[in-house]
């Protein structure tokens, strides 16, 4: 059983998308081939859109930023300053070899982090990512908005890509796409909900909750193996 804590890398400035993908691929390959340490890479991108493997061109409405094709699952999403991205490179063979449980862990991880700031993040059947019931924040009944996106790729049991939490991005930048192909619901952020948490605050919360969530599932999976 793997009890090792992953290496955490926290970038201070924005990282270009092509550079990030190259570095992430190299890290994942090193884990697969050489047993290198698992890595959690926390960063921001300059404003851009990414297209997942299920992206529908009709959801690219009026892109004002570069569009990058990517190997992760999912559809179109926006990345930019004020959004914390966690690229997660884990060896699932050491963590239960269960893709569904891994995605569930990512969701639980985001929800736990948001709880630290008084925000209730929730799952929604048929919708990827983490959502907020905006009724709790003074919006009309039934209003929901997405606060975090998830998109993963797994190759030979090593994970890539990961999640993006909207801390304080310019939400108008999401207007160039239909985020994740989901119409009829908005996008929100911690700042939009009145929380003045910083990127560093989010980093600390993610790091605080990681071991409890991911190690718990690893132990449970192996106990049933």
Image (spheres, rainbow, N blue to C red):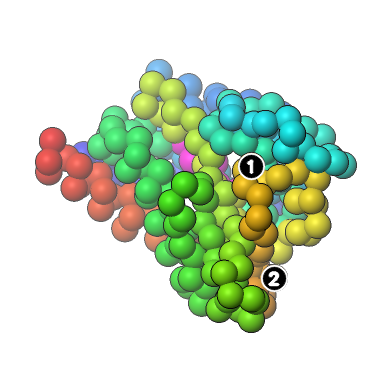
Magenta segment, which residues? 85-89
**Which residue was labeled with disc 2?**
192
What percent of the width, then of the height, locates residue 81?
Answer: 75, 53
110 left or right of 66? Answer: left
Q: Who's the residue at 67% across and 46% down the image?
A: 179
**Which residue was labeled with disc 1?**
181
Q: Main secondary structure of the magenta part?
A: strand
Tell me which corner region of the image, top left, top right, bottom left or bottom right, holds residue 193: bottom right
> Is the C terminus in the top left, top right, bottom left or bottom right quadrant?
top left
Q: Where 154 sits versus 46, above or below?
A: above
Q: Secondary structure at mark 1?
A: helix
Q: Secondary structure at mark 2?
A: loop
Residue 31 appears in the rendering: no
In the depicted view, which residue is nearer to us: 13 or 119? 119
In the depicted view, which residue is nearer to us: 11 or 186? 186
Q: Residue furthest top?
A: 33
In the depicted view, which residue is nearer to us: 156 or 4? 156
Q: Who's the residue at 12% across and 43% down the image?
A: 223
What percent of the width, then of the height, locates residue 155?
Answer: 44, 23
Camera-nearest label, 2 or 1: 1
Tell me which corner region of the image, top left, top right, bottom left or bottom right, holds residue 143: bottom right
What percent of the width, then of the height, locates residue 19?
Answer: 70, 30
Q: Residue furthest bottom?
A: 138
Q: Earlier in the sequence, mark 2 or mark 1?
A: 1
What number of labels is visible? Answer: 2
Q: Who's the residue at 25% across and 53% down the image?
A: 216
């Amino acid at each position: 059983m793997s009890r090792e804590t992953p290496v955490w890398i926290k970038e201070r400035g924005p990282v270009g998308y092509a550079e990030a993908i190259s570095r992430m691929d190299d890290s994942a390959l090193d884990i697969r081939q050489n047993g290198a340490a698992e890595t959690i890479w926390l960063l921001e991108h300059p404003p851009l859109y990414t297209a997942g493997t299920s992206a529908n061109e009709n959801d690219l409405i009026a892109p004002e930023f570069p569009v990058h094709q990517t190997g992760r699952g999912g559809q179109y999403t926006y990345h930019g300053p004020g959004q914390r991205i966690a690229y997660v490179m884990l060896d699932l063979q050491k963590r239960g070899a269960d893709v569904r449980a891994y995605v569930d862990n990512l969701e639980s991880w985001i929800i736990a982090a948001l709880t630290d700031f008084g925000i209730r993040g929730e799952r929604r059947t048929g919708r990827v990512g983490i959502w907020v019931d905006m009724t709790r924040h003074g919006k009309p009944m039934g209003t929901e908005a997405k606060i975090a996106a998830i998109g993963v790729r797994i190759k030979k049991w090593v994970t890539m890509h990961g999640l993006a939490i909207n801390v304080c991005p310019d939400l108008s930048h999401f207007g160039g796409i239909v985020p994740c192909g989901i119409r009829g619901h908005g996008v929100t952020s911690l700042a939009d909900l009145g929380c003045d948490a910083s990127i560093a605050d989010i980093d600390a919360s993610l790091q605080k909750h990681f071991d409890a969530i991911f190690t718990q599932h690893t132990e449970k999976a192996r106990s049933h193996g």
